[in-house]
Amino acid sequence: MSGQAATKTPAIRPQQVTGPNGTPIGLQDLPPPDTTRWVMRRKAEVVSAVRGGLLSIEEACERWNLSLEELESWQRLIDRYGVRGLRATRLQQYRGNERRSPPADRR
């Protein structure tokens, strides 16, 4: 085992990876770099591309002008709730569950 981080892109990149709906996707199938409307399908395609090694997480952030935190949040939402967790209408509900902490002891 090489010990490389999961965000590293392999030396030899695959031409295609399995997309979020089970079909093969390549770089040409990903959202355009100037995308501003991030529907759940597009977010899931980017996460699939990064996880499959089409591009690194750093390259994805640069290509789509995303923060590392935003892309990592997409990955967490997919892991916890599936692709449907990426719905903008549910985002606040899911994020609220992640950030909730027990009430402080008030004396």
Image: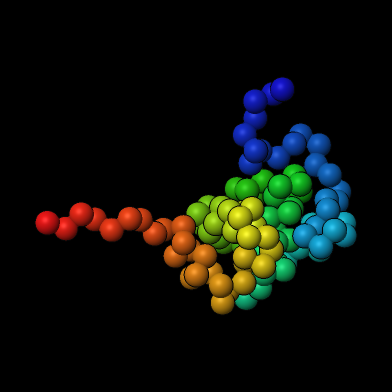
Residue 38, x across and y down, in percent:
63, 71
Q: Relative to the observer, which residue lies in front, 11 or 104?
A: 104
Q: Position of residue 90 (x, y in %)?
A: 56, 72
Residue 40 in view here: yes
Q: Residue at x 33, y 55 (%)?
A: 102
Q: Position of residue 17 (x, y in %)?
A: 83, 51
- Residue most extreme to the left: 107
Quadrant of the rendered image containing residue 35:
bottom right
User: What is the image's colouring?
Assistant: rainbow
Residue at 68%, 60% in the rendered image: 82
Residue drawn at the location 72% of the way across and 22% of the way down? 1
Give the residue displayed 85% in from the left and 58% down from the top: 22
Of the 4 image quadrants, the one containing the C terminus is bottom left
Name above or below for residue 31 compared with residue 98: below
**Residue 10: horizontal and vertical position, in percent?**
75, 36
Instruction: Please give left or right for residue 29 compared with residue 1 in the image.
Output: right
Residue 60 in view here:
no
Q: Nearer the viewer, residue 102 or 76?
A: 102
Residue 71 location, quadrant: bottom right
Residue 58 vertical placement versus 46 (above, below): above
Left or right of 15 in this view: 87: left
Q: Quadrant of residue 63?
A: bottom right
Left or right side of 52 for 74? left
Camera-side residue of 88 and 6: 88
| Number of numbered markers | 0
